[in-house]
Image (cartoon, coloured by chain):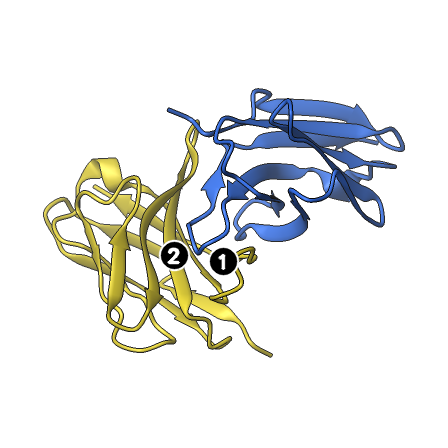
Amino acid sequence: DAEITQSPRHKITETGRQVTLACHQTWNHNNMFWYRQDLGHGLRLIHYSYGVQDTNKGEVSDGYSVSRSNTEDLPLTLESAASSQTSVYFCASSESGMGQETQYFGPGTRLLVL
Amino acid sequence: DQQVKQNSPSLSVQEGRISILNCDYTNSMFDYFLWYKKYPAEGPTFLISISSIKDKNEDGRFTVFLNKSAKHLSLHIVPSQPGDSAVYFCAASNSGNTPLVFGKGTRLSVIA
């Protein structure tokens, strides 16, 4: 069955370290998204991609970067982790070219920055 | 500026009764609306959607109503079941590959 996976599921790191969260989907979707979920803020968009070599900034992109070298993967990198980046991170994907498409979410990565 | 607002952070309903979750939006260009359900420690899962050409969409116990003039949509769950206890997110987009905009969510508790 096609799916979207995230790894690791839990991560503890220290401030200033670089961290990369992986996202892999097997639906062959062109669109991929990264969100963070925080209490009182709901789901906020960090970065998104509409295809290989395409990346775009979302609402809360400062301190994060992504790269899209193939259809299946969109890794999220925290260049220098900060305590404010402690959060739950969700990756999602959707088909392209339909206009009104549904996003499908991964199980999430819980990140703690000490 | 919040474009999608869920003004009720939480809602409690008795099992068997109707649950009504509300969502307001400010961007008149939005033409596609979705509801997602999220259990703790899991990713959000798609529940139901509605296009702006409709004012109602029904799927089993779940019905979404759209009032474009009021820029308001609601999710009705009838009858409510304990397994419906979750956080519900409203989301909206306009056609043309723009990302979804999510509300902050409403936590529904269905009491047996």
Q: Give the secondary structure at mark 1.
A: loop
Q: Earlier in the sequence, mark 1 or mark 2?
A: 2
- Chain A drawn in what color? yellow
Same chain for marks 1 and 2?
Answer: yes
Residue B82: x, y in percent? 78, 39
- Disc 2 crowd rating (10 Å Cα; few below 14, some 14-19, many 20+) is many
Quadrant in the rendering for residue B37:
top right
Residue at (78% x, 34% y) in the render: B76
Q: State left or right for residue B4 relative to residue B107.
A: left
Quadrant of the snapshot with the N terminus of chain B: top left
Q: Position of residue B90 (x, y in %)?
A: 58, 37
Q: Is residue A3 above or below residue B52?
A: below
Q: Colour of chain B?
A: blue
Q: Is residue A23 left or right of residue A113?
A: right
Residue B106 is marked as none
Please state which of the two labelled residues, at mark 1 or mark 2, is closer to the viewer.
2
Residue that carries the numbered disc 2 in the rendered image: A33
| For the residues bearing labels 1 and 2, Cβ distance under 8 angstroms | no
Hey, which quadrant is residue B83 in on the image?
top right
| Residue A24, image x, y percentages | 40, 71
Q: Amino acid at mark 1?
A: Pro
Q: Alpha-carbon distance for marks 1 and 2?
A: 13 Å
Query: Viewed as shown, does residue B42 lie left or right of B52?
Result: left
Residue beneath the point at 46% across and 40% down: B101
Name the element at disc 2. strand
Q: Which residue is mark 1?
A: A107
Measured along the vertical axis of the image, is residue B15 above or below residue B95?
A: above
Q: Name the subunit of mark 1.
A: A
Residue under the point 44% across and 55% down = A108
The chain letter under disc 2 is A
Residue A50 falls in image quadrant: bottom left
